[in-house]
Image: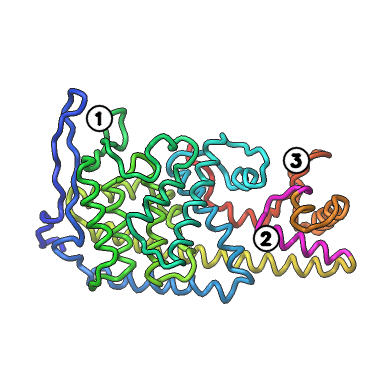
Amino acid sequence: MSETDLTPRIGEYITTTMVGESVRTYVPRDLPPIPPIDMQSLSNLVSDAMLALGRLDGVRSVAPDTSLFLYMYVRKEALLSSQIEGTQSTLSDLLLYENEQTPGAPIDDVEEVSTYVAALDHGLKRMEDGFPLSMRLMREMHGILLSTGRGSTKLPGEFRQSQNWIGGTRPGNALFVPPPPGAVLDLMTNLETFLHAEDELPIIVKAGIAHLQFETIHPFLDGNGRLGRLLITLYLCSEGILEEPLLYLSLYLKTHRKTYYQLLNEVRDHGRWEVWLEFFLLGVKEVAEQANAAAKRISNIFEADAQKISNLKRAAMMARKVHEVMRQRPIVTIALITELCDTTVPTATSALRNLEKLGVVLEVTGKERGRIYAYTEYLEVLDEGTDPIH
């Protein structure tokens, strides 16, 4: 690839004046990249990534209930994606918030994670009903993503009508200034056309290209990073590469965020799409393998704990019901168990205490009132890699 002239791939800088200072905005080239992507250099990585995705999709035959794993995995991704943007929430904070308990992190941070979950759920439901992955769907999801909290004043659900920037205190000292607002609609129209075009590029490669182009366009005033990461998995689901939305790259991008930002600029300034795609495909393979391994570990935990519960004899029936609830809600209160298991407070309390004696759950407050029980071993698997970025 080194002998190929990549200058046709490089976007142009448009200099404008904003608030009395000169600002260089970057407008990327339309997709697909010209000259075409060198697929020969990427073919082995594409094969490895697709093999890992196939194994991940096979989790449905291993996990006792994929919906439970999916429920929690989506929340982990929401958390990681929001942490990249600077929120300080933990997984426990989100689960406490969803149980109407007080989280340890600022409420705005936790709401930000919660709306991510809602946006993803909306996108998947719309696609299940036959609605295409499109600009309209992206705007709908963005509207949900920014429905509350810090971004709620930044045109939720609408493409930006003013200039945004990344890093710095103003466009004049920013690290990167995306295209001017007047260019956004045409660029997003081209991106949508590229997603649905019938061409020779593998879907997984198109997902990587689309993600970077979306991040470069930065079509919204806020929430671009989170929506851009969502776009990857939604596209793979829409094209039938994944049956369930089990692939999320936020842990990989969070871990390698310095390289990630460097490679965005490699494409923008030098047209080196292949270098970015190598990184992206390695990430898909790594994350798919991690998710596959996590699903198997969680299945083993559920199975081992179900075996412990079966030894409770008469008390086993209610303990089993509570265990089933805690597969989906790893943090619960006695009141919540009473409601979800349709039982009495004493019966719920007794069942939780039995599970605690078995080492399945742990009471985490140390209080007599307002006790909170956590499914600790399950949470430990989900918690891996979710420490906030300080």
The residue located at (74%, 45%) in the rendering is: 372
Instruction: Identify the image quadrant of residue 182.
Output: top left
**Residue underneath mark 3:** 365
Mark 1 and mark 2: Cα distance apart in space? 48 Å
Where disc 3 sits, the SS reads loop
Local packing at callout 2 (Cα closer than 10 Å; few below 14, some 14-19, many 20+) is some
Viewer-nearest residue: 268 or 224: 224
Q: Amino acid at mark 1?
A: Asn
Mark 2 and mark 3: Cα distance apart in space? 20 Å
Image spot of residue 74 (x, y percent): 53, 56
Image spot of residue 285 (x, y percent): 41, 65
Which comes sooner in the sequence, label 2 or label 3?
2
Where disc 2 sits, the SS reads helix
Q: Are marks 1 and 3 in contact (CB under 8 Å)?
A: no
Q: Amino acid at mark 3?
A: Thr
In the picture as drawn, the residue positioned furthest to the bottom comes out as: 61
Local packing at callout 1 (Cα closer than 10 Å; few below 14, some 14-19, many 20+) is few
In the picture as drawn, the residue positioned furthest to the right comes out as: 314
Q: Which residues are magenta?
A: 315-335
The reply, left or right, for residue 341 in relation to residue 387 is: right
**Residue underneath mark 1:** 173
**Residue underneath mark 2:** 327
The residue located at (17%, 51%) in the rendering is: 270
Residue 93 among those drawn in magenta: no
Viewer-nearest residue: 373 or 346: 346
Instruction: Identify the image quadrant of residue 356.
Output: bottom right
Q: Nearer the viewer, mark 2 or mark 3?
A: 2
244 above or below 175? below
The reply, left or right, for residue 3 in relation to residue 41 is: left
